[in-house]
Image: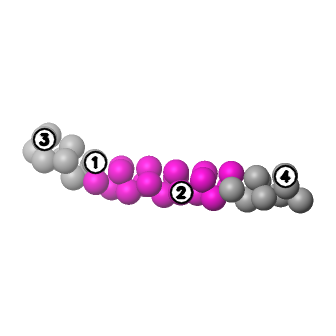
């Protein structure tokens, strides 16, 4: 039971990490385009 909770937390953390990474990339691309343009 305890391992199951840890697994759920790990899945959640991984999901949140991917989500924030995606947001960071979306914010970074326009800055990159402004610099190159």
Of badges 2 and 3, nearer the viewer stands 2
Is 3 covered by the magenta stretch? Answer: no
User: How far apart in space, not on screen, are marks 1 and 2 (Cα)?
Assistant: 18 Å
What secondary structure is found at the residue carrying circle 1? helix
- 2 or 3: tag closer to the N-terminus: 2
Q: Residues within 10 Å of mark 1 (few under 14, many from 20)?
A: few
The label on residue 35 is 3
Query: x%, y% of residue 13?
Result: 60, 53
Image quadrant where one finds the N terminus: bottom right
User: How far apart in space, not on screen, are marks 4 and 2 (Cα)?
Assistant: 20 Å
Residue displayed at 36% across by 50% down: 25
Is 21 covered by the magenta stretch? Answer: yes
The label on residue 16 is 2
Observer-nearest of 37 and 2: 2
Q: Which residue is mark 1?
A: 28
- Left or right: 35, with 28 as reference point: left
Query: x%, y% of residue 7?
Result: 76, 53
Q: Are marks 4 and 2 in contact (CB under 8 Å)?
A: no
Q: Residues within 10 Å of mark 2 (few under 14, many from 20)?
A: few
Question: Against 33, is 1 above or below?
Answer: below
The label on residue 3 is 4
Q: Are marks 1 and 2 in contact (CB under 8 Å)?
A: no
Of badges 3 and 4, nearer the viewer stands 4
Of badges 4 and 1, nearer the viewer stands 4
The label on residue 11 is none
Residue displayed at 21% across by 43% down: 32
Q: Point out the stretch of residues depicted in magenta.
A: 10-27
What colouring style does the render use? one colour
Q: Are marks 3 and 4 in contact (CB under 8 Å)?
A: no
Residue 27 sits in which quadrant? bottom left
- 3 or 4: tag closer to the N-terminus: 4
């Amino acid at each position: 039971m305890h391992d199951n909770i840890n697994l759920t937390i790990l899945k959640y953390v991984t999901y949140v990490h991917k989500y924030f990474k995606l947001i960071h990339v979306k914010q970074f691309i326009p800055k990159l385009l402004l610099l190159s343009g």
